[in-house]
Image (tube, helix red, strand yellow):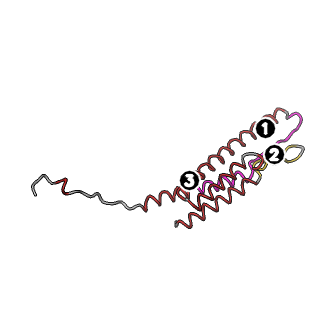
Amino acid sequence: MSDRARSNVLLGAAAVAALGSFLPWVTVTIFLGTITANGMDGDGKITLGISAVLALVAWFARRWAVIPALALTGIAIYEVVNISSKLSDMKSQAQIATSLQISVHGSIGIGVWLILAASLVATAASLYGLRQGAADIPVEAPTTNTAEMSDGWT
């Protein structure tokens, strides 16, 4: 993959992650209706900032793109686990009130999944770039100094 193509992949991933920061992160449906929380209601501000850093790094210093890419991946995984845990707790509390026929359904929103997918693509592209960059470094054959190796018999 060329440097330009890798930059385009990283910029695209940053744009998708930034978009995911604004989209719904969790949707809960109860007997009263549906409640949706967008990324900007919580940690979406952090993911938006890291997406901006990823875009800048992809444009100016691709070698360092792995850092914001891994940060986005970590935050996305944390959000999936955190939201899943909270939804599970909410469902178990709703089961206590089953005699009232309360139905509760919740799901992780598209925003978190987009951030996770974009961060994984950015991580893969940046790690590939690091590996490709290491492969481009020429390895020189060791040189020997014949003067140091001689035993004085010249």
118 within the magenta span = yes
Q: Which mark is residue 66?
A: 3
Residue in the foreground of this view, choosing between 20 and 98: 20
Looking at the rendering, which quadrant does residue 12 occupy? bottom right
Tell whether 20 sits left or right of 143. right
Q: Amino acid at mark 3?
A: Val
Q: Are the residues at dot 3 and dot 2 in contact (C-beta closer than 8 Å)?
A: no
Q: Residues within 10 Å of mark 1 (few under 14, many from 20)?
A: some
Q: Amino acid at mark 2?
A: Val
User: Which tag is nearer the camera, tag 3 or tag 2?
Assistant: 3
Tell whether 121 sits left or right of 150. right
Give the residue pinned by disc 2: 28
Q: Residue at x 71, y 39 (%)?
A: 85
Q: Residue at x 54, y 54 (%)?
A: 64
Residue 154 spot, x, y in % from top left = 10, 58
The magenta-colored residue range is 98-122
Cα gap from disc 2 to disc 1, whole angstroms: 10 Å
Q: Residues within 10 Å of mark 2 (few under 14, many from 20)?
A: some
Looking at the image, the residue that sits furthest to the left is 153
Cα gap from disc 3 to disc 2, whole angstroms: 34 Å
Residue 141 spot, x, y in % from top left = 30, 60
Residue 24 spot, x, y in % from top left = 77, 52
Q: Are the residues at dot 2 and dot 1 in contact (C-beta closer than 8 Å)?
A: yes
- Label 3 or label 2, whichever comes before in sequence order: 2
Compared to residue 149, the image places residue 6 above or below, namely: below
Secondary structure mostly taken by the magenta-highlighted segment of the chain: helix
The secondary structure type at the circle numbered 2 is: strand
Q: How many numbered marks have been drawn onto this rendered protein structure?
A: 3
Give the residue pinned by disc 1: 90
Q: Residue at x 49, y 57 (%)?
A: 130
